[in-house]
Image (cartoon, rainbow, N blue to C red):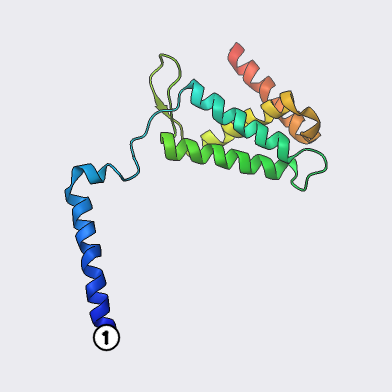
Amino acid sequence: MNFLNVFKSLSIPFIFIAILFNSNPKLRELRASNKLIPANEKDLDLYRSMGITYLCTTSAKGTDADFEKSLVVATNLFSTVMQQKHGGIIKEGKKKQQKIEARLLQNNIMFQLVGGALSYCPNNVPEVMEKEFRNQVKKIQESNKK
């Protein structure tokens, strides 16, 4: 019986706060913003640089993490930020905004991170991944010629 009285007396302030937050527009602004802003080139460069730095640092010789694991972590972090902060929407220059499908976004990010790692820490990139990257670059160049 005592527990029920305590519960009732504690629940009243919580109900009041919930009603206050839902009815007062100023207090509603305290909640996290859910407005999605498209990622611009500056945002993409920042996320790419952070991913490459993480990848090169964690996959350096003498560390416990290998390149593939570090690549997956860096790709997932980059992709998560793009999805949560920007809704997967990218605005490039004066072009209109476009939403990129999550799987395509992850593949693109992974490709960019491997390319960056080849530029900044080429000794960390496994030969198999380097060959695959070079093959993909050739395919892209050939398709652009058409």
Which residue is outermost to the top?
Answer: 145
Question: How dense is the environment of label 1, judged by Cα within 10 Å: few (below 14), some, or many (20 and up)?
Answer: few
Q: Quadrant of residue 123?
A: top right
**Measuring 73% from the left and 25% from the top, which residue is drawn there?**
120
Q: Quadrant of residue 142?
A: top right
**Measuring 72% from the left and 40% from the top, which residue is drawn there?**
58
Point out residue 49 in the picture as x, y percentages from the top left corner. Answer: 61, 28
Quick one: 22 or 117, which is closer to the camera? 22
**Measuring 67% from the left and 22% from the top, which residue is drawn there?**
137
Quick one: 81 or 30, which is closer to the camera? 30
> In this figure, which residue is indicated by the disc labeled 1?
2
Q: Amino acid at mark 1?
A: Asn
Which residue is outermost to the left?
Answer: 23
SS at circle 1: helix
**Measuring 40% from the left and 13% from the top, which residue is drawn there?**
94
Point out residue 34 in the picture as x, y percentages from the top left corner. Answer: 34, 40
Q: Is residue 88 left or right of residue 71?
A: left
Point out residue 59 in the picture as x, y percentages from the top left corner. Answer: 75, 39
Q: Is residue 74 left or right of residue 37?
A: right
- Image quadrant holding the N terminus, namely bottom left
**Where 96 sits versus 101, above or below?**
above
